Amino acid sequence: MKKTKDISFQQAFEELEKITTSFERGDGDLDRGLQLFERGLELAEILKKKLASVEQKVTIMKKKFGDMEKKEEHEALDG
C-alpha cells in the first residue's frame, strides 16, 4: 500500500478495484477484511477529494472560457 498523500488518482482507483475484487471473491479472514474495508474507505475519500478538485478546476476554466467568448462577441459587435 502506498502512502495515502502520495497516491495518484489512478493508483487509488486501481487499489480500490483490487479491494473490491477481493471482497467479491470472499478472500481473507475477518481481520484482513476489516483492514481492507478501512483502506477502501480511505481510498474512496481520496478519490472523492481529487474529483472535487478537478471539478472545481473545470468550472473555473469554463467560466474563464465563457468570459473570453463574451469579450470576443462584444468586440466583434463593437468592431
Image (cartoon, rainbow, N blue to C red):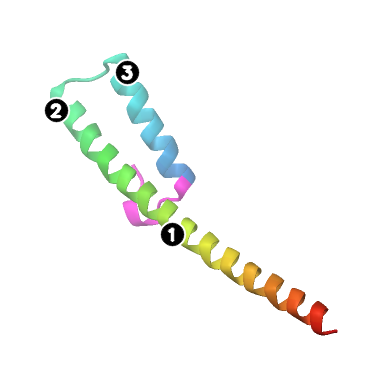
How many dots with numbers? 3
Distance CA(mark 3)–CA(mark 1): 30 Å
**Circle number at residue 31:** 2
Mark 2 or mark 3, which is nearer to you?
Answer: 3
Q: What residue type is labelled 2?
A: Asp
Location of the N terminus (image quadrant): top left
Q: Position of residue 9 (x, y in %)?
A: 45, 48
Location of the C terminus (image quadrant): bottom right
Residue interval drawn in magenta = 1-9
Mark 2 or mark 1, which is nearer to you?
Answer: 1
Question: Please, which residue is most extreme toward the right here?
Answer: 79
Image quadrant where residue 49 sits = bottom left
Which callout, 2 or 1, points at the residue further toward the start of the chain?
2
**Circle number at residue 53:** 1
Residue position for label 3: 24
Residue in front for this viewpoint, 79 or 7: 79
Residue at point 80%, 79% (across, down): 77
- Vertical comparison of 2 with 74: above or below: above
Element at label 3: helix
Which callout, 2 or 3, points at the residue further toward the start of the chain?
3
